[in-house]
Amino acid sequence: MFIIKKITTILFGSLLLSIGVNFFLIPFQLLDGGMIGMGLIIKYLTGFQTGLAIILLSVPIFTLAWIYNRSYFYNSLHGMLFSSLAIDYLSPLHYPFIAKFQLPAIISSIVGGVFIGLGIGMMLRYKTSTGGTDLLAQLLSKVIKVNLGIIIFVIDAIVIVIGGILISTETLILSIITIIFVGLFTTICTWNLQY
């Protein structure tokens, strides 16, 4: 029964994350942090697919997980693959969404952050993640005993600042709002969770 819940959580969490990225962040060139943010920076600067970029960028961290904690490696591999594929699969749908629902950028940054935070938080509750910096946060959380949401927030902030420098000040400001909501909802979902 646990495995069915875990698979369902990975699929649903990946879907929520992908909705947040494609329907709320991409239309305004907003960023999440971590590997998703780095994948989005690559997309905005080169047009390369976000999900594929996430997979490629995650290889070094998955290598660390393989060396130091193989259970994190195995648990996160599925989350990373499903969420990356969901992001690329739903990507073409963001244009019709933009045409139908013209949200202000600030609302989009908040709602996108909520969707992404819920997706990541749900997966972390079942000891899986989207890989990348979430996986790095899991490894760090075990060592420094700090809540996962807080560690993810710090890593995300670093990525957002880099993205803001490379893309625009507006991207930086709105993406800060996004990661605040990602961090908040990830923390809510993982509060009192021990790794």
Image (cartoon, rainbow, N blue to C red):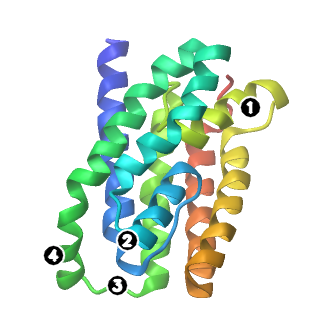
Identify the image quadrant of residue 154: bottom right
Return the residue at label 1: 141
Earlier in the chain: of badge 4 and badge 1, it is: 4
Which mark is nearer the camera, 2 or 3? 2
Mark 1: few, some, or many residues within 10 Å (few <14, many ≥20)? Answer: some
Query: For residue 26, which numbered disc appears in the image?
Result: 2
**Where is residue 19 drawn, in percent x and y?**
31, 58
Using residue 150 as the reference point, say whether residue 98 is left or right of it: left
Q: Position of residue 66 (x, y in %)?
A: 58, 17
Kind of residue at disc 1: Ser
Q: Nearer the viewer, mark 4 or mark 3?
A: 4
Q: Residue furthest right?
A: 144
Q: CA distance from mark 2 to mark 3?
A: 12 Å
Q: Nearer the viewer, residue 106 or 83?
A: 83
Q: Of helix, strand and loop, which one carries label 2?
A: helix
Which disc, if any, is residue 96? Answer: 4
The crowd level at tag 2 (other Cα within 10 Å; few <14, some 14-19, many 20+) is many
Few, some or many C-alpha atoms within 10 Å of disc 4 (few <14, some 14-19, many ≥20)?
A: few
Q: CA distance from mark 1 to mark 3?
A: 36 Å
* Quadrant of image for the N terminus: top left
54 vs 74: above or below: below
Q: Residue 90, how many percent across, how many down?
A: 22, 56
